[in-house]
Amino acid sequence: MLYVYLFVCGAMIIFNIVTAVLFRKSERRTEKVSKNLRYAVMLRLKAAEAGSPIDKNHKLYLSRKLRKVGNMIAFDKMLEAEYISHPQEIRNYLHSLDEVFISLMAYYMKRNRIEAAYFPYIIKKYRVIAYRSFYSLEGALLELLNEPSIYCRENAMQALYTTGDVDCIIKAIKTIDRSDLFYHRKLLSDGLLNFAGSGNTLGKKIVENFFDFSVGMQVTLLDYLRFSGSEYQKFALSLLINEDLNDEIRYAAIRYLGKYPFSKAYEALCGFAEENSEQKWEYAAIASTALGSYPCENTVHILKKNLYSRNWYVRLNSAASLKNLGITYSELSDIIDGNDRYASEIIRYCLQRDYSGEKEAVHI
């Protein structure tokens, strides 16, 4: 047994040594290729300064050389270093390589998914298609949204965000929505915030196309609108009062109106905050949080009443909102010293700690 143990330890040591040698060799090769690429690119940049266009041979050289991921990594490393001192020159240089990028995109899309995911990352990093029509690459990136690999789809979306093209992004969202592949809603709602174009224009386009999307995507897009601004209060209210819509959409509308107070929504929010047998408890729980943004005597009355709810989440959210409204211990003494143990405990719990909402039923 001892000999077996020694053999395993020896094999692990040899493996680590061989791996270290190979990695070092790979790093030296990357540095060498990066140096050669830098030399070739700098020659082209100097020629461009003199008024000479990028010649065909250089483009063929890049199309052939960059088909290896290792060489693409070296190219990335070189661009990273040169971009610091020559940002505009590097941007102009990359914009002159359209045929190269089309050729490489077609090649990498046929490779394994890890390699295919790396190329959109380069497009996004150096904003190759930013603020200009590049239908060939945009079309290829839209195709990648149907790939099973989440890395392919996310990198493709990140590249598309740089276009600043609202119609392209709407098309991409619809492609994701119609796919059977899972795409985490937070990944998309947060990603849309990286859109390089006008967020206001994108928001209006989303509202315009809202009912073309599935319920799940509608909730995701409402999350994005909640993060992006307060211009959609009327739209959120119209969703909230529409009884034909899915509950999740209406929950998202309440969250939006909780973040961006809208006087015309107050009456509806009060109605949802007051529990009744005809509605789900989630409405009262989320609306109780939203009312924390609507300070007035009636709000305090509703929230204090909700402290006696049978549902723990309704009580918790109401107590948290009362604290956020600045209601003091003395103003709640009738509840704290009252006969309802659960109401007393929940308000004590919120007043005596720095409440962060981590245990809220449905986050606002």
Image (cartoon, rainbow, N blue to C red):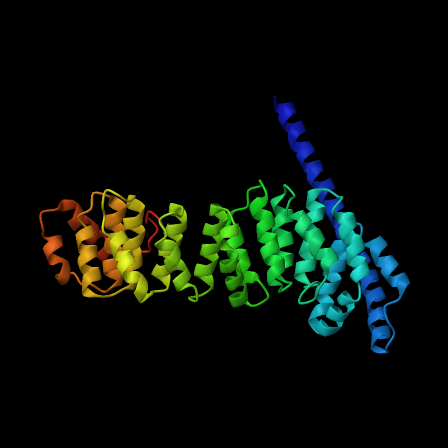
Q: Nearer the viewer, residue 355 or 249?
A: 249
Q: Position of residue 231 (x, y in %)?
A: 43, 67
Task: Name which residue lies at 38% across and 58% down.
Answer: 238
Query: In the rendered image of this protein, does residue 290 appear above or below residue 313?
Result: below
Q: Position of residue 321 (x, y in %)?
A: 26, 58
Q: Residue furthest bottom?
A: 50
Task: Name which residue lies at 40% across and 46% down.
Answer: 246
Q: Residue furthest top?
A: 1
Q: Nearer the viewer, residue 338 or 84?
A: 338
Q: What quarter of the picture does the N terminus occupy?
A: top right
- The quadrant in which residue 44 appears is bottom right
Is 174 displayed left or right of 260 in the figure?
right
Task: Name which residue lies at 78% across and 53% down.
Answer: 104
- The quadrant in which residue 72 appears is bottom right
Is 338 displayed left or right of 258 in the figure?
left
Please say whether residue 222 is visible from this viewpoint. Answer: yes
Q: Position of residue 324 (x, y in %)?
A: 27, 62
